[in-house]
Amino acid sequence: MSNLTPTTPAQLASNAPTWVGLQRAISISSGFQRWCVETGQALSTDSKQSKEQLVMAYLRQTLETLAY
């Protein structure tokens, strides 16, 4: 088993463009849109934090479902 090391702020900064692009792709996907409707979540286009929180919640639930 590999050792996990904490992510440094520099690593986070270098991955920021990737994460932003991934969030954008996920937020326009039909699966994410359906999940928002099914869970009663409203995606506000003016709130970056809200979008990030929703995408993270969607990914968490999707991974939990897959792990089940």
Image: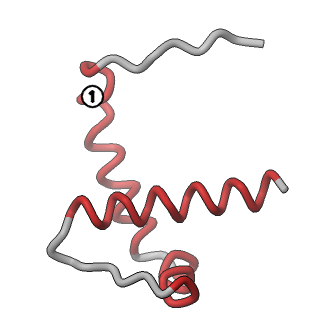
Circle 1 is placed at which residue position?
14
In this view, the residue farthest toward the right is: 68
> To which quarter of the image does residue 61 belong?
bottom right
Q: Position of residue 45 (x, y in %)?
A: 21, 78
Question: Residue 40 versus residue 21: which sits nearer the camera?
Answer: 40
Q: Position of residue 43 (x, y in %)?
A: 33, 79
Q: Position of residue 54 (x, y in %)?
A: 41, 66
Q: In the displayed structure, does residue 1 sit left or right of residue 10?
A: right
Q: Is residue 50 above or below residue 45?
A: above
Amino acid type shown at disc 1: Ser
**On-image quarter of the C terminus:** bottom right
Q: Is residue 49 above or below residue 5?
A: below
- For the residue labelled by badge 1, is the local secondary structure a helix, a strand or a loop? helix
Q: In the displayed structure, does residue 7 sit left or right of residue 63?
A: left
- The residue positioned 40% from the left and 55% from the top of the image is 22
Q: Is residue 21 above or below residue 38?
A: above
